[in-house]
Image (cartoon, rainbow, N blue to C red):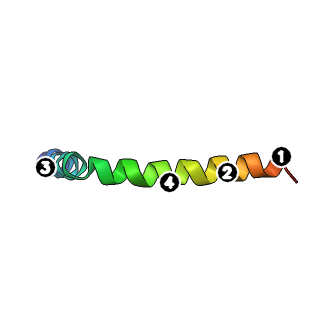
């Protein structure tokens, strides 16, 4: 149980430090999917 708690705490720390980078990556991925979706209508 302590291992799970320590792993969760370290993952939480990584997310809190790098949340802006994760947001940047998710925004790019969302834009690519949206572009592919809209591009499928233009064919």
Query: Helix, strand, or loop for circle 1?
Result: helix
The mark nearer the N terminus, 2 or 1, is: 2
Q: Residue at x 83, y 46 (%)?
A: 41
Contact? badges 3 and 4 (CB < 8 Å): no
Quadrant assignment, res 5 = top left
User: Mark 2 = which residue?
Assistant: 35
Q: In whole angstroms, how far apart are the C-alphas of marks 4 and 1?
A: 20 Å
User: For the view shown, which residue lies furthest in the right direction?
Assistant: 43
The mark nearer the N terminus, 4 or 1, is: 4
Q: In whole angstroms, how far apart are the C-alphas of marks 3 and 4?
A: 31 Å
Indicate left or right for 19 with 40 as reference.
left
Q: In whole angstroms, how far apart are the C-alphas of marks 2 and 3?
A: 40 Å
Q: In whole angstroms, how far apart are the C-alphas of marks 2 and 1?
A: 10 Å
Query: Helix, strand, or loop for circle 4?
Result: helix
Query: Helix, strand, or loop for circle 2?
Result: helix
Viewer-closest of 6 and 30:
30
User: Mark 1 = which residue?
Assistant: 41
User: Mark 4 = which residue?
Assistant: 28
Contact? badges 4 and 1 (CB < 8 Å): no
Indicate left or right for 8 with 29 as reference.
left
Q: Residue at x 43, y 55 (%)?
A: 25
Label 2: few (<14), some or many (≥20) within 10 Å?
few
User: Mark 3 = which residue?
Assistant: 6
Q: In whole angstroms, how far apart are the C-alphas of marks 1 and 3?
A: 48 Å
């Amino acid at each position: 149980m302590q291992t799970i708690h320590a792993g969760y705490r370290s993952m939480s720390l990584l997310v809190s430090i790098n949340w802006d980078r994760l947001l940047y990556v998710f925004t790019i991925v969302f834009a690519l999917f949206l572009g592919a979706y809209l591009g499928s209508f233009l064919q």
